[in-house]
Amino acid sequence: MDEHSKDETINDAVKKMKTDVYYLDLDSLLSQLNDSFSDSSLAIAKQMSHFSYGGIMKITHQLVTGKGFNPDMIKEHYEYYNLDNDLIAS
């Protein structure tokens, strides 16, 4: 993979399709997603799982077993919406 390497012809149709189309499209899609979404919006999207049925049941189980609720689990939400983290924890 340098300036002295020789180009190889791909004879297998499936490998050529992957190289010329699939990987190129996948790279383009990944670049567009990285350009479109900031790290903070991705963090908010990841934390949305805490508001699903399973996430709420997990938090409820933690409260029942005395482990409490860590408001840092949804830190990006209360910072983005300017909410009081102590109020959320209670």
Image: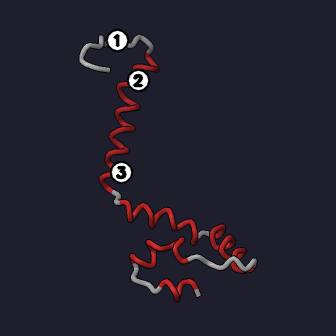
The disc at residue 8 is 1
Q: Quadrant of the N terminus?
A: top left
- Spatial CA span between label 2 and label 1: 15 Å
Q: Position of residue 79 (x, y in %)?
A: 41, 77
Identify which amino acid the numbered label 3 is placed on. Answer: Leu
Going from N to C along the chain, the mark reached first, 1 or 3, is 1
Q: Contact (CB < 8 A) between labels 2 and 3?
A: no
Task: Inspect the image, locate mark 1, and give the three-letter code of the amino acid beneath it.
Answer: Glu
Q: Residues within 10 Å of mark 3 (few under 14, many from 20)?
A: few
Quarter occupied by the C terminus: bottom right
Q: Secondary structure at mark 2?
A: helix
Nearest to the eye among marks 2 and 3: give it.
3
**Residue sitting at the far right:** 65
Q: Residue at x 39, y 64 (%)?
A: 41
Which residue bears the numbered disc 3?
A: 33
Q: State the residue at coordinates (52%, 74%).
A: 72
Whether residue 57 sits left or right of residue 25 in the image: it is right
Q: Residues within 10 Å of mark 1 (few under 14, many from 20)?
A: few
Residue 12, placed above or below residue 84: above
Quickly name the residue at label 2. Answer: 17
Residue type, mark 2 in image = Met
